[in-house]
Image (cartoon, rainbow, N blue to C red):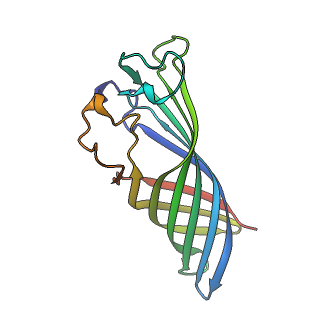
Amino acid sequence: MLARSPEFWGTYPLGLSAKRKVWQRKRFSSFIGSGVGYENATFYRPFDHTVFATSGSTTADIKALNRYKKVFTPISFSAFYELGDHWFLLGELVSNFLVFRSIRNTEWSREGFAYTASTFELDDIQFRLGMNGRIGKVIIGIYSRVANVQKIDRIIFNDILKDPRTDQTWEWHNPLRIDLSVGYTW
């Protein structure tokens, strides 16, 4: 299945958030924040379309996706340590709440294939470490996910694929992820 994937890397996140300083003491400061996040996975795999309660979705046919889009509401707690006038170490704890998902297969033009659902559920909790640099009021950062506990998505990990984690709801899964951030302070 993965050999048919349209992209090598497969998943692309993008987000926008606002943070507010809640504490500062000497070189330490902490922030809380929230925003909106978007993730587009371009891998090719079968999925359990019966999860979506739409008419005609209860057939036994196996359907495959190549676009899985999710919209999140992240809630974050960040701690910064100032190394100098322009450099900061960052530790961040982020909880992502899934609010919307959409599944499509761009290879097919059948009507009714796009499956969508609104929801509100905790999807993952991540711990990230990184480095930020400040130029005037612009902050540029790079950080990596260090730990990640996430809900197993039964839409794409299910009996169709013979997933051995049938008794699990959550998993520790931490594929390499490096993020670039750009911010503005006022």
At x 51%, y 67%, the residue is 92
Kindly indicate the quadrant of the structure image that contains residue 79.
bottom right
At x 42%, y 59%, the residue is 145
185 is higher (above) or lower (below) than 178: below
Relative placement, left or right, of 157 versus 70 is left
Relative placement, left or right, of 60 versus 40 is left
Relative placement, left or right, of 80 versus 128 is right
Near-viewer residue (52 or 179)? 52
115 is higher (above) or lower (below) than 75: above
Q: Is residue 66 visible?
A: no
- Residue 44 image position (x, y, % from top left): 37, 27
- Residue 128 image position (x, y, % from top left): 45, 64
- Residue 75 image position (x, y, % from top left): 59, 60
Q: Is residue 74 visible?
A: yes
Near-viewer residue (31 or 154)? 154
Kindly indicate the quadrant of the structure image that contains residue 33.
bottom right
At x 58%, y 85%, the residue is 27
- Residue 152 image position (x, y, % from top left): 38, 45
